[in-house]
Amino acid sequence: MQIVFTVLMLLLAVAMSGVVSRLSPIRLPLPLFQIAIGALLAAPAFGLKVRFDPELFLLLFIPPLLFVDGWRIPKRQLYQLRGPILALALGLVIFTVVGVGYFIHWLIPAISLPVAFALGAVLSPTDAVAVSAIVGKNRLPPKLQHVLEGESLMNDASGLVAFKFAIAAVLTGSFSLWQASLSFLVIALGGLAVGGALAWLLSLGRRMVARWTDDEPAIQVVLLMLTPFAAYLVAEHFGVSGILSAVAAGIAMTYTESGQGSSAMRLQSNSVWSMLEFVFNGMTFILLGLQLPSVIGLAHADAREAGNVPVWHLFAYVVAITVALIALRFLWVWVTYHLKSFRMLLQGSPVRKVNTWVILTTSLSGVRGSITMAGVLTVPLEISAGVPFPGRDLLIFLATGVILCSLLLGSSLLPLVLPKVPTPVETMKEKEEREARLRLALAAQAGLEQAQARMDRELADDDAKAMLADIAATLAQIYRNRIDAESDTAEIAQRANQHRNFERDLRMAAIYAQRTELYRLRDARLIDDDVFAVLLRDVDLAENWLSGPLVSKH
């Protein structure tokens, strides 16, 4: 019963965090509100206690979140930007582990160098979801957004693998760079292979189930939801990266599901994943907040045992480490940008001027999140029987503090820096969307003409032919308006968009009138609840369609 109550409280907290963030006069990112709500629930007045199991957390929350990120990330941009993504997800991780590790050891001599490397490794993964929560969706330049999303997908695995090697070095007292590099390749490539293979097999299985169940969407959606967990568990069973396996499964699903499945299944799965994404992301930060009081208390006790270190020193360490992380990230991005420019100069290609504001935005976007929290909590309690792990509670406090500090710095500085970053008037995405809408409208127009000609030949009745011609003319006008809306001529596009806005407003008015009458019929008991549900669904679908991006941005 206690578990059920705790889960319900967490779900309520996630829902309330969304309400509070909307109503709050202070504009802060949603994760900060969720952390604050978690800390409030852990206070003695509420006393909600949740034992944080890192292994369970990594299994329950991380695979589905990374799976859906891999599924939704633009694959073409992921391939085109593979250079900067890998430079951040692999090169910067190693640079961070070494650089921050030495800095932490210098700053806090009580933390040995191997333990400092472990802390640097667990601080290397970034959280693109938190960045989106800070700046808002589609506020970052598209190219930078794709780089940050790709980095976040990949560096979760590279950071945690580096963390495991550092912890192993602390426990055994030995470290082999060659063996660690080879193991990393096996773990990473193995995880990618397992995820891709499982995505293909499970997609094949879902198609078979769809044939056996008359394409029932609910069954397929449930099977789809199990895919990231299967990818993670199978990969971990074979000793490879479960995180990369979940990412690979999400990326591969784009291709294995291409042209497959019904529209009902796609609509339901998108709705379910959107809800789960909101709930799981919210729970990760609320759980982080729930750990705050105990983390601060244990770290204070740990610091006192190490030499009666004042509490304010602990917070100063957090700020110093956060600033060091941002500085190292800035240095890495600055060097890679200039190396790329130098290489293009040698090749005779046109060289773009390096924009410092872009580099600064990239540096401030290295916000830490739930992976860091889950990773640091897996630090073992003991090195060996009866020998406690040195400074474990202090490590957890420092990692948690860096998460909070990076969120606060990002939320206060990114909105100031972002307006100075140049953005194209019309992004490539908007241009492609406009051209694709035009092609779709032209294809629909051609298909309509072919269908009308075929049906006209099959009809013998003149009245039926006249009815068909009227319907075809009405539909043809709709697609002509859509073609005009995507026109390169501004006047034609503006007039077509005005026509569609009028049409949308009139249709919305008709839908509201339908819904009002439908509720009146139900309340007067003139129709049954089953009939009411069917008709209400039709009205809701019509409104949902009208609420979409029907009007061109051009």
Image (cartoon, rainbow, N blue to C red):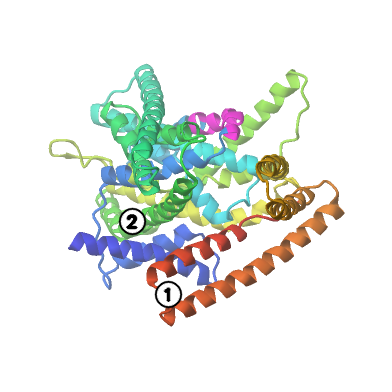
Q: Which residues are magenta?
A: 76-91
| Residue kind at label 1, given as amino acid type | Ile
**Does 300 lie within the magenta span?**
no
Residue 69 vertical placement versus 506 (above, below): above
Residue at the image position 43 percent from the left and 41 percent from the top = 66
Residue at the image position 55 percent from the left and 39 percent from the top = 329
Judged left or right of residue 355, residue 154 is: left
Residue with the mark numbered 1: 527
Specify the label residue 323 is tagged with: none
Number of marks present in the image shown: 2
Secondary structure under tag 2 reads: helix
Residue 8 vertical placement versus 492 (above, below): below
Q: Is residue 163 visible?
A: no
On the image, the x and y values in percent for residue 472 come to: 71, 51
Q: Is residue 300 visible?
A: yes
On the image, the x and y values in percent for residue 497 come to: 76, 58
| Residue kind at label 2, given as amino acid type | Leu
Quarter of the image for residue 39 reads bottom left
Q: Give the mark, 1 or 2, whose residue is nearer the N terminus.
A: 2
Measure how far apart labels 1 and 2 are at the Cα level. 47 Å
On the image, the x and y values in percent for residue 26 come to: 54, 69
Residue with the mark numbered 2: 287
Choose mark 1 or mark 2, whichever is in front. Answer: 1
